Image (cartoon, helix red, strand yellow):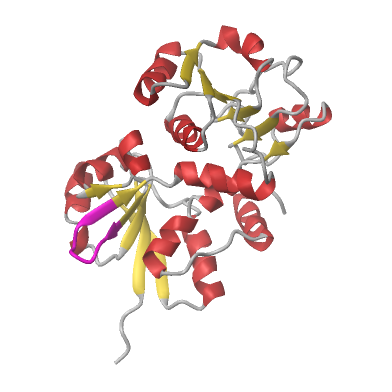
Amino acid sequence: MNASPRKAAITGHPVAHSRSPLIHGYWLKELGIDGEYGRVDVAPEIAEEFYRNFSASGLIGANVTVPHKETAAKVCDWLDGAAKAMGAANTLWLDDTGRICGANTDGLGFLGNLDQLAPGWDNSTGSALVLGAGGAARAIVWALLSRKFTRVHIVNRTVEKAQKIAEEFGAGTFAHGWDELGTLLGETDLLVNSTSLGMTGKPPLEIDLAGLPKHALVNDIVYAPLETDLLKAAALRGNPTVDGIGMLLHQAVPAFERWFGVRPQVTDELRTLALKDLGVIS
C-alpha cells in the first residue's frame, strides 16, 4: 500500500484568497512530488489551541498568515533567529521528536528577490531607508542587518512605531518621522517601500525622489500594480528598481524545502503564473 501524500497548508483567517496553494502546487507538480498543499481557516478563538496541538492536524507543516503569526510563534518549542527577533512565525513543521518548530521567512523572501533581480545589490552595505514600521518593515530590517548594512533608517508617519523597531534591533537602526525623509534620501543606497501606499485601492505614496542618488536601488514590496508609481518615478530618473512579487515567491522557497526535501526555484514561469492569478497581467 502506498503511503499517503505529505500534506501542508496555509493557515490563518481568512485564507480563501491566499496565493500560497498556487505557488506550492506549482512546485509539487513541477518536481513530481507526491504531496498536497491546501488551506485551513483557523478562527481566532481557536488559534492557540490549533497551533499548540499542531501534531494532531494531519499536516507535516504549515504556513501562517495574519492574524496568527505571533500566536504560532508563542506555542513553538523551537524558533529560528528571524522568528525570535520578530516574535512571529510564518512557517511551521514538526521535527523528528515531534517538537513544533517555527521560522520566519519573510526576510529571506526579501533578500531572495533582490539577489535574483539585482545581483550584487549588497556589495556596498551602506545606508538603507525603509518606509513603514509594520510587520514587513520588521522583516526587512532584520534582513538588511543580516547582510551587514551599517545604517538602516526606518521612516514612519507614527514615529513611535519606528522607534519600537529601532529599539528592538539596536545598533545600526534609526527611527525617523516622515518630515525627515527629504534629508535622509540624499545618503541612501537602498530605498524600500514596505507600506501599502501605492497599492491598488490604497492612497498614493507621495514622495519626491529629487535628492536620491542615481545609484540607489529602489524596491517596492507592493505588487499590485506591479510597477508602482514609486518604481516608475525611480526608473525615469535612472535608478535601478525591483518589484515586489518576488518577495512573495521567495519567502515560500525555504518552507517548501523544509517540508518536501527539495529546494524549488523561482522561475519566470512561476512569476507569470502568480501575476496572472493576481490579475496584475492578463
Q: Quadrant of the N terminus?
A: bottom left
Q: Residue at x 40, y 18 (%)?
A: 161
* Number of numbered discs visible in the structure rendering: 0
Picture coordinates of residue 135, whole percent (x, y): 42, 32
Residue 247 lies, in percent from the top left, at: 55, 45
- Is 67 located above or below residue 126 in the figure? below
Looking at the image, is 115 positioned above or below residue 61?
Answer: above
Bounds of the magenta segment: 93-101
Residue 237's quadrant in the figure? Answer: top right
Q: Is residue 245 visible?
A: no
In the visual, does 27 lie left or right of 259?
right
Quarter of the image with the C terminus in it: bottom right
Is residue 84 visible to the viewer in this orientation of the structure?
yes
Of 199 and 54, the residue lying toward us:
54
Q: Is residue 131 magenta?
A: no
Q: Is residue 13 left or right of residue 33?
A: left
Point 68% across, 59% down: residue? 268
* Residue that extends furthest to the top in the rendered view of this protein: 179
Q: Is residue 14 or residue 144 the one in the foreground?
A: 144
Q: On the rendered structure, is 89 left or right of 98?
A: right
Residue in the image at 24% along x and 49% along y? 78
Instruction: Pick whichever, 127 or 11, lies toward us.
Output: 127
Query: Which quarter of the figure has residue 178?
Result: top right
Q: Determine whether, in the image, residue 199 is placed left or right of residue 94.
A: right
Q: Is residue 98 magenta?
A: yes
Query: Where residue 245 sits in the image (x, y, percent)?
Result: 61, 46
Q: Residue 93, position in %: x, y?
A: 30, 59
Q: Is residue 6 above or below residue 132?
A: below
Decide which of 11, 186 is in the foreground and name it.
186
Toward which corner of the image does residue 71 lie, by quadrant?
Answer: top left
